[in-house]
Each structure stands twice: as structure tokens, then as C-alpha cells.
Image (spheres, coloured by chain):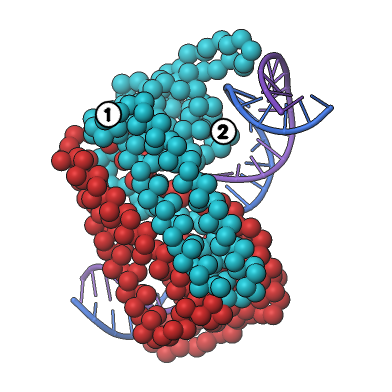
Chain colours: A red, B cyan, C blue, D purple
Amino acid sequence: MNSLGYAILSLLVRKPCSGYEIQMLLDALWPAKHSQIYPLLNKLKENHYVTFEQVKQTGKPNKKIYSLTETGKEVLSEWVKETPDPPVQRDEFLIKAYALWLTNEEDGIHLIQDRLKRYQYLLMEHQKTVQEMEKTFGDEVLNKTSPQFGRYVLFKRRIQMDVEEINWCEWVLGLLR
Amino acid sequence: MNSLGYAILSLLVRKPCSGYEIQMLLDALWPAKHSQIYPLLNKLKENHYVTFEQVKQTGKPNKKIYSLTETGKEVLSEWVKETPDPPVQRDEFLIKAYALWLTNEEDGIHLIQDRLKRYQYLLMEHQKTVQEMEKTFGDEVLNKTSPQFGRYVLFKRRIQMDVEEINWCEWVLGLLR
DNA sequence: CCTCCCATGTAACAGGTTACATGATTAT
DNA sequence: ATAATCATGTAACCTGTTACATGGGAGG
């Protein structure tokens, strides 16, 4: 089993989801395309880590709602205890920033400004999510035994990182002008 | 050509390097294994983006020193102007943090503390690099036309991110206790 | 004696992206 | 009209990791 598999289990332990829903929730955790998710869900089912039931819908296509089994919950709990692999960030922007000195002022400023705008937008999105969670769940989000806890602290982390990215962009823009 | 190819070109535009040296410099930019780097260098050579010369060494294995060609420099400059792909961060820790509420207090604290230590170490390493650059190059590091500029601002960015990661870990540890 | 550093390469495999495929409903 | 949302799946391809392969010199 790979990281993506465990990421899916960690979503399903909070609540049953369709494959489609899983893809969107994964965005904040371990982004993946549906072409990777659906075959993996079948594999998880074969391993008896998840089960699903067909849900018929009118006006929308039918869907499969996946739930975690007891076995699934156990393997997830065991995996969480093991030390995680070091993070890997692949960010084309960093390469372009590294080679910034090659370009003219205009192109350089443009590169940084696009980045700045992107993270200003992301910051707003992430703040929205946090505010929604606080409104819906109240103090529960800060309770370490609540299913909301992990999601909440991760979004708080994202916000801090967004702010730093913005600060850095503004600092670099100052140097470029 | 893929991102790794351009990352290599952006290193070589600063100074000629061996494949081995490239791997180490790539660590801060676009980490890659030597098994990916060496075949790519041959491809870059076939495309006439780079050239190399054999350097015989005594006491050490011989090496190939790769340099950027004019063509290589041109394609790199053009690529830098295009808008970069959005960053992808794959971080197993985030999945485990998301599923933190499943574990007992001990395991949870352990997970966060390991992360904290890791980033305290990385912060020190990155600060060392920045101080070295400042000592070697002085104000040149802040000159947007200097080959040092990109590398310098990227390490400054890393330091800010390290600090935020540390702050976040300490905040979460407070919640867990 | 053993491990780390230097230095380069190939082959098999796992993980991830793009493209192909289908199709109804709702909003602009 | 046209795009976006919901919903699932497969196949071909590209990218990245692990393992195989070699070998001298330095330092603990």
C-alpha cells in the first residue's frame, strides 16, 4: 500500500465518501487524479479495507459510497505510528526564481507578481475553510480527539505558509524594483 | 524537455558542474536521484544544450564537467518567462497529522516532535548556507542581476518556511498536552 | 575493518498525468 | 449554445525510485 491509499483511508475514517468526493478532499492532503483514485479504491475493496454501497440518484449519476472497515481502521492506525517519509516539494516556480537574474526586470516582476496573486487567493480560500469549520464545529476543532482536529490544524498551517509566501514575494518585489 | 532538465540548465548557467555536483545542488531546487540525472545529461548533450569535457583526477574517479551552450542558455531564458506549473507538495506527515485523532497522546506527540526536530535542524542548515553566501558574496546576493541572487532569495524563503513549520509544531504540541 | 565520499552508469518497477470514453443536469 | 458539476472507469505514457554494478582513497 502506498501513501495515497492511506490518505484515502484517513478520509474515510471521518465519514463515508464517494470517489468523486474523495478526490476533492484529497486536494489539501495528497492531490490525485480520479484515474488514480478509482482503481485504488477497487484495490482497497479487494483487501477488505473498505466496503461500498451503490447509491441511486435522480438528476445525477449514481455513485458508490465507500466506508472504512474495522480492518481498514486498524491498518491506518498502525501506519500513522510509523515515522513518515520526508516531504518532497516539486515547484517549478523555484527553478524559475533561481534563474531570475537571466531575465529582464519586466519578466521577473511578472513571475513574482503572479505567484503573489496566487497565494493571496489561496490564503482567502483557506481562511474561508477555517472559518466554516469554526462556525460548524466550534471548540471541537481544537479537541485532539475530534475527527475535525487534524483537518483544522492542517488548514491553520496552510494559512501560515500562505502568509509567509506572500511576505516573501513582497520582499523580492522590493528588491527587483 | 521536463522541469528537471530546466533545473539542470539553471544550475549550469551559473557555473559548469559534474553530474555528481549537480545532484547536490538540485537538492534545494528539484531533488533527483543520480539514476535520473545521468541519462538526462546525455539527452541534453544530444540536443546541444550542454557540452562536457572529461577531467582526469588522481585519487578520485574521473568526471565529466558539463557546461551550458548558447542554445541551452536561450531555451532556458525562454522557459523562465512562461508561467510555471502550480507546485505539488507530497508530504506523508500531513496525512498522519490528519489522522492524529485516531492515535493515543504519546504517539501523536512523538509524530509532531520528530517533525519539530527535523525542521529545527533544517533551519540551522539553511541559515548556515545563507551566512556563507553573505560572507562570500556580500551585497552581491541582493543584486537582481547577480548569478547569486536566485539562490540567495530561495534560501531566505526556505528559512521563513522552516520558522513557520516550527511555530506550527509548537502550537500543535500545546494543543496535544 | 568498515563506512563515507567521489563518480558514473543501466534496468526494473512504482507512482502519477494525460487522454480516451460516456452522459445527464444546471447555470450563464 | 456552452461550460461547469456530478460520476465512474481504462489505457498509454511520462516521471521518479530502488536496485544492480564498479572501484579507489580517506578517516575513524
Q: Which residue is mark 1?
A: B140
The correct choice, above or below, for A66 with respect to B129 in the image is below
Tag 1: amino acid? Glu
> Considering depth in this image, is A63 or B142 the residue closer to the camera?
B142
Q: How far from the left and from the top, in percent, is residue A164?
A: 33, 56
Label tally: 2
- Check disc 2: other Cα within 10 Å, few if <14, some if 14-19, many if 20+: some
Give the chain letter at badge 2: B
Amino acid type, callout 2: His
Give the image location of residue B81, x and y in percent.
Answer: 25, 40
Residue A78 visible, this angle = yes
Q: Earlier in the sequence, mark 1 or mark 2?
A: 2
* Residue B62 sits above or below residue A41 on the image: above
Q: Looking at the figure, which quarter contains the N terminus of chain B? A: top left
**On screen, residue C19 above or below A172:** below
Q: Which numbered mark, 1 or 2, is in the foreground of this view?
A: 1
Residue B58, image quadrant: top right
- Does mark 2 fall on the same chain as mark 1? yes
Using a 10 Å C-alpha cutoff, classify the residue at mark 1 as few (fewer than 14 neighbours), some (14 to 19) or many (20 or more). Answer: some
Q: Residue at x 26, y 50 (%)?
A: A169
Task: State the residue in front, B109 or A61.
Answer: B109
Task: Quickly name the residue at label 2.
Answer: B34
Residue depicted at x 52% and y 67%: B173
**Residue drawn at 32 percent across, 24 percent down:** B71
The answer to whether any part of residue A45 appears in the image is no
Q: Name the chain under label 1.
A: B
